[in-house]
């Protein structure tokens, strides 16, 4: 989750991250499982609380892991290092040091919607010293500008992306897409209803708590997580016969051009 979300309602939160984060991590790992080498060097840009990088490291053999976030402070890093001693923490991509290696994968998990000029940022990242010809970029973003609501505003999102818009930014950034699409179709319909209610009730300035405010117990969290995973695998079946459904998240896997 974002550092902003990490800091809210800290006394009320459980030890679990939001089930959406667990489900998203499993979706991304599924998309990558046949595309990575046996041992991996990974850079997670805009990593927040390093939840995703930790989940990824549990499923793949990661020998170098770097977490990058401009919101890191000494106190935040000291707290995160207590449970993530094998991760290097830096504030800027220029500080990433893989000791001459190239990253196998760079993650941008719901990051570039926070950046006003996403193309310039992606160009700079693609030219970083740790990026090679075979480095994979996994990008996820919130889907569809028409669903932009108070939650996006509160999080500091400049935009949401449909697939065409994301691929356009990628192409302008000297990157090329390997595969792309949507996931979490059921949440797309739920957010559409939420957006409609927000318009009717004129709640555009409402300040939500975000996923950092999740306080449900383990059972409810697991039910929600498994529901999202069933959603992903069910609607993914349709892609094999050429039927594509929208989702609340857009993704693209790409490399340098």
Image (cartoon, rainbow, N blue to C red):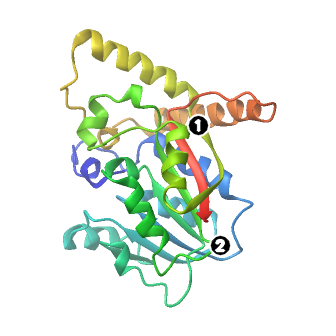
Residue 217: image x %, image y %?
41, 37
| Neighbours of disc 1 within 10 Å: few (<14), some (14-19), many (20+) | many
Identify the residue at horizontal 50%, vertical 26% (top origin).
188
Question: Could you tell me which residue is drawn at 42 percent across and 16 percent down?
Answer: 193
Which residue is nearer to you in this view: 159 or 42?
159
Name the residue at the right extreme.
241
Q: Which residue is mark 2?
A: 134
Q: Is residue 227 left or right of residue 151?
A: right
Mark 1 to mark 2: distance in Å? 25 Å
- Asked whether the viewer can see residue 111, the reply is no
Disc 1 on helix, strand or loop?
strand
Q: Is residue 36 left or right of residue 173?
A: right
Single out the mark in the foreground, 1 or 2: 2
In this rendering, position of residue 253 left or right of residue 207:
right
Residue ranking furthest to the front:
172
* Image mark for residue 183: 1
Residue in view at x 26 percent, y 73 percent = 78
- The answer to whether the residue labelled 1 contacts the one labelled 2, judged by CB atoms less than 8 Å apart, is no
Q: Residue 195 at x, y = what percent?
A: 36, 20
> Reading the chain from its start, which is encountered first: label 1 or label 2?
2
């Amino acid at each position: 989750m974002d550092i902003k979300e990490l800091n809210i309602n800290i006394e009320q939160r459980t030890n679990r991250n939001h089930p959406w984060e667990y489900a998203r991590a499993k979706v991304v790992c599924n998309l990558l499982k046949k595309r990575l080498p046996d041992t991996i060097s990974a850079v997670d840009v805009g990593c927040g609380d390093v939840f995703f990088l930790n989940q990824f490291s549990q499923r793949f053999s990661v020998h170098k892991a770097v977490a990058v976030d401009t919101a890191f402070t000494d106190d935040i890093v000291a707290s995160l290092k207590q449970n993530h001693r094998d991760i290097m923490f830096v504030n800027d991509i220029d500080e990433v040091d893989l000791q001459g290696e190239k990253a196998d994968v760079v993650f941008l998990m719901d990051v570039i919607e926070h950046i006003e000029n996403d193309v310039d940022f992606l160009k700079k990242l693609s030219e970083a010293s740790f990026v090679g010809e075979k480095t994979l970029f996994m990008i996820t973003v919130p889907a569809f500008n028409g669903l932009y609501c108070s939650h996006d505003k509160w999080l500091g999102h400049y935009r949401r992306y449909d697939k065409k818009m994301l691929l356009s930014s990628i192409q302008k950034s000297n990157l090329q897409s390997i595969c792309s699409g949507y996931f979490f179709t059921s949440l797309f319909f739920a957010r559409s209803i939420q957006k409609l209610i927000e318009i009717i009730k004129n709640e555009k300035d409402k300040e939500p708590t975000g996923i950092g405010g999740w306080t449900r117990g383990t059972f409810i969290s697991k039910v929600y997580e498994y529901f999202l995973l069933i959603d992903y695998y069910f609607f993914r079946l349709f892609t094999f016969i050429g039927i594509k459904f929208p989702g609340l998240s857009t993704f693209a896997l790409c490399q340098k051009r």
